[in-house]
Image (cartoon, helix red, strand yellow):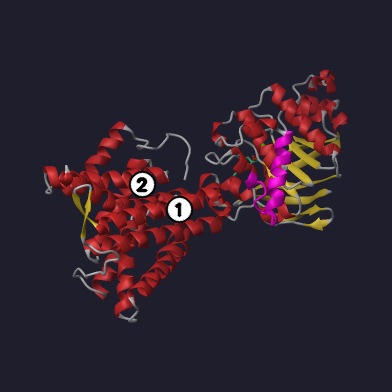
């Protein structure tokens, strides 16, 4: 569904990605893990047209989409939820959602989608007229996820959704992602919370120094001692899907 | 009492025109981190565009106004963004501030050398005849100036809040990175902001020049007042810039009438210093978050 071929790129003259290659199948969740500064967020920016790509290719359903703009990526059915806070602070919750469909030619349909998405996140309906900045951090993240669903994406790139969320809310977000996956949406996620994230994922990718180090079934990575040492705090044997709950 | 009402109304009238310039100033600051020290000249120049339209091209007044508005949007909106802000902003805010100061001088000198150094009469949009208003003799011009500028502010606010384009402009100003990943055409929204600023400056020019006459140096006071009104109001807010503009207009008139006209020019500065000391975030401003 999504394929990266030997992607090289970075910021200005600094190269951060030194040949990232992987492909992820449709309707699966893949979690990308790696140490701080490995270039995980940079991979997302590269896919979404926010990075200067020196060489290599990005393909979606076999179609070359390297160096396309965010607007074009949205048109291909990709949405991106970056790390950190990504709301428009002074606009209402409703109008933040509406922005998720700003590129759609049929705005009546966007209105319907907003209703559907608010059904999935009742909190957003309750606070629809509040300014987004007045929501709590966890509510803002839910708003961002909801907004990313507005155009019925095929592929969601989601960067560290759990930061700043309580464990309960993290489970809520993960449940949403699993539900989307079951509906056929493809998800690529970056998570610090590696154990819990791998436990709910189909595949895992380990990125280090801007290169793909490992790419395997999530269940295999969970029990791989190398991964355990590096990123899971060394307690690999404890890592079981049960930890996610 | 009737004199007070008269002074108050004419202060509000002038203040509401200042507010137009101040709002444009705040919008451009938000959307493109541009502190436009040529804002006063942006109010001075459109009057000369109108005079050129009438004198040089023989246009009737109303057509010359439309011509002045269009030319201002082209020169002070589009060209200003493309030729000055876009190339210079990457070099830093301070560099851009200096560039706008230089632009102010350039506009002033160009008008002075190529048109005239003398104040030019400018046709009034509205009659200057006095009208009885609760016992006070106020000029129709003041009342209509106030009504027109407040209507412009209302229309602008409705546009920014009630239309999708307006909300996309707010998104582009408040969080350009997010606006971009959602597919908002951020560059175009910023351009709209510059066009709106030029339009606001022109409308302010059309309302205020009949009072002050058209002179190359008109921008000096107006620019300073717009800047101070924007700061007094909280730099980020339309509402703030509006209140700041009105406040300066009224205080200016009150002190000139009841205290002394001598230190009139110093008043906005005194207000500025007081605000900075007491409420650095401005009257309406909040210390966090940018808003339109
Ligand atoms: N805008 C930028 N300009 C220049 N360098 C950047 C920029 N953003 C990130 N970098 C650098 O690129 C490298 C990779 O950053 P990136 O954000 O992709 O890492 P990450 O794997 O997502 O890390 P984290 O786990 O901390 O989020 C880091 O060395 C970082 O300093
Ligand atoms: Mg990151």
Q: Position of residue A63 (x, y in %)?
A: 81, 57
The residue lying toward the viewer, choosing from A69 and A92, is A92
Q: Residues within 10 Å of mark 1 (few under 14, many from 20)?
A: some
In the rendered structure, are the residues bearing label 1 and label 2 in contact, judged by CB atoms less than 8 Å apart? no
Seen in the picture, residue A200 relative to B236 is either above or below; the reply is above
Q: Position of residue B249 (x, y in %)?
A: 25, 48
Residue B45 in the figure: left or right of residue B217 = right
Q: Residue A65: say if magenta.
A: no
Say whether residue B196 is left or right of residue B181: left
Q: Kindly identify which numbered label has been placed on residue A178.
A: none
CA distance separating discs 1 and 2 = 12 Å
The dot on residue B156 is 1
Q: Which residues are magenta?
A: A98-120
Check disc 1 and report its element: helix, strand or loop.
helix
Give the SS element for disc 2.
Answer: helix
Tell me: is circle 2 under 8 Å from ligand 1.
no
Chain under numbered label 1: B
Q: Quadrant of residue B88?
A: bottom left
Decide if residue B9 is in sight here: yes
| Displayed quadrant of residue A62 | bottom right
Q: For this rendering, which residue is in front, A207 or B119?
A: B119
Residue A90 image position (x, y, % from top left): 52, 40
**A103 in magenta:** yes
**Residue designated by label 2:** B242
Residue A53 visible to an observer of this rendering: no
Looking at the rendered structure, whether the residues under marks 1 and 2 are on a common chain is answered as yes
Residue A176, placed above or below residue B4:
above
């Amino acid at each position: 569904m999504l394929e990266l071929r030997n992607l090289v790129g970075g910021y200005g003259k600094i190269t951060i990605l030194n040949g990232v290659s992987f492909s992820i199948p449709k309707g699966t969740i893949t979690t990308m893990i790696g140490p701080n500064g490995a270039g995980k967020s940079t991979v997302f920016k590269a896919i979404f047209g926010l990075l200067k790509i020196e060489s290599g290719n990005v393909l979606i359903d076999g179609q070359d989409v390297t160096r396309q703009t965010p607007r074009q990526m949205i048109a291909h059915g990709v949405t991106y939820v970056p790390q950190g806070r990504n709301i428009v602070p002074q606009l209402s919750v409703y109008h933040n959602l509406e922005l998720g469909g700003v590129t759609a030619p049929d705005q009546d349909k966007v209105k319907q989608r907003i209703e559907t998405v608010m059904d999935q996140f009742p909190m957003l309906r309750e606070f629809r007229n509040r300014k987004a900045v007045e929501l709590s951090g966890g509510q803002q993240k839910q708003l961002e996820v909801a907004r990313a669903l507005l155009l019925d994406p095929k592929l969601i790139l989601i960067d560290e959704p759990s930061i700043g969320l309580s464990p309960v809310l993290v489970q809520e977000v993960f449940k949403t992602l699993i539900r989307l996956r079951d509906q056929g949406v493809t998800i690529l996620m970056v998570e610090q919370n590696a154990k819990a994230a791998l436990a709910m994922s189909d595949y895992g990718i380990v990125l280090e120094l801007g290169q793909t180090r490992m790419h395997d079934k999530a269940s295999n990575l969970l029990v791989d001692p190398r991964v355990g040492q590096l990123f899971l705090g060394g307690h690999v044997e404890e890592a079981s899907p049960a930890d996610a709950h | 009492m009737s004199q007070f009402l008269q002074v108050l109304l004419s202060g509000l009238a002038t203040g509401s025109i200042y507010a137009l310039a101040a709002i444009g100033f705040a919008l451009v600051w938000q959307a493109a981190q541009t502190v436009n020290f040529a804002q006063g000249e942006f109010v001075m120049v459109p009057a000369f565009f109108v005079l050129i339209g009438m004198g040089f091209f023989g246009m009737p007044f109303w057509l010359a106004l439309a011509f002045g508005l269009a030319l201002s949007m082209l020169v002070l909106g589009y060209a200003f963004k493309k030729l000055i802000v876009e190339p210079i902003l990457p070099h830093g805010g301070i560099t851009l501030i200096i560039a706008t100061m230089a632009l102010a001088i350039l506009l002033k000198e160009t008008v002075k050398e190529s048109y005239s150094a003398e104040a030019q009469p400018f046709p009034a949009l509205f009659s200057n005849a006095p009208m009885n208003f609760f016992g006070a003799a106020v000029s129709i011009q003041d009342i209509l100036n106030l009504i027109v500028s407040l209507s412009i502010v209302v229309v602008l606010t409705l546009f920014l809040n009630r239309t999708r384009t307006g909300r996309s402009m707010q998104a582009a100003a408040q969080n350009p990175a997010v606006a971009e990943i959602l597919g908002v055409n951020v560059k175009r929204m910023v351009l709209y902001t510059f066009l709106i600023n030029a339009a606001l400056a022109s409308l302010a020019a059309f309302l205020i020049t009949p009072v002050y006459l058209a002179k190359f140096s008109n921008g000096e006071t107006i620019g300073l007042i717009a800047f101070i009104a924007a700061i007094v109001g909280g730099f980020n807010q339309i509402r703030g810039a509006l209140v700041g503009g009105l406040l300066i207009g009224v205080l200016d008139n009150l002190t000139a009438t009841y205290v002394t006209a001598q230190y009139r020019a110093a008043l906005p500065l005194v207000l500025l210093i007081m605000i900075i000391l007491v409420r650095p975030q401005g009257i309406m401003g909040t210390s966090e978050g940018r808003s339109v």
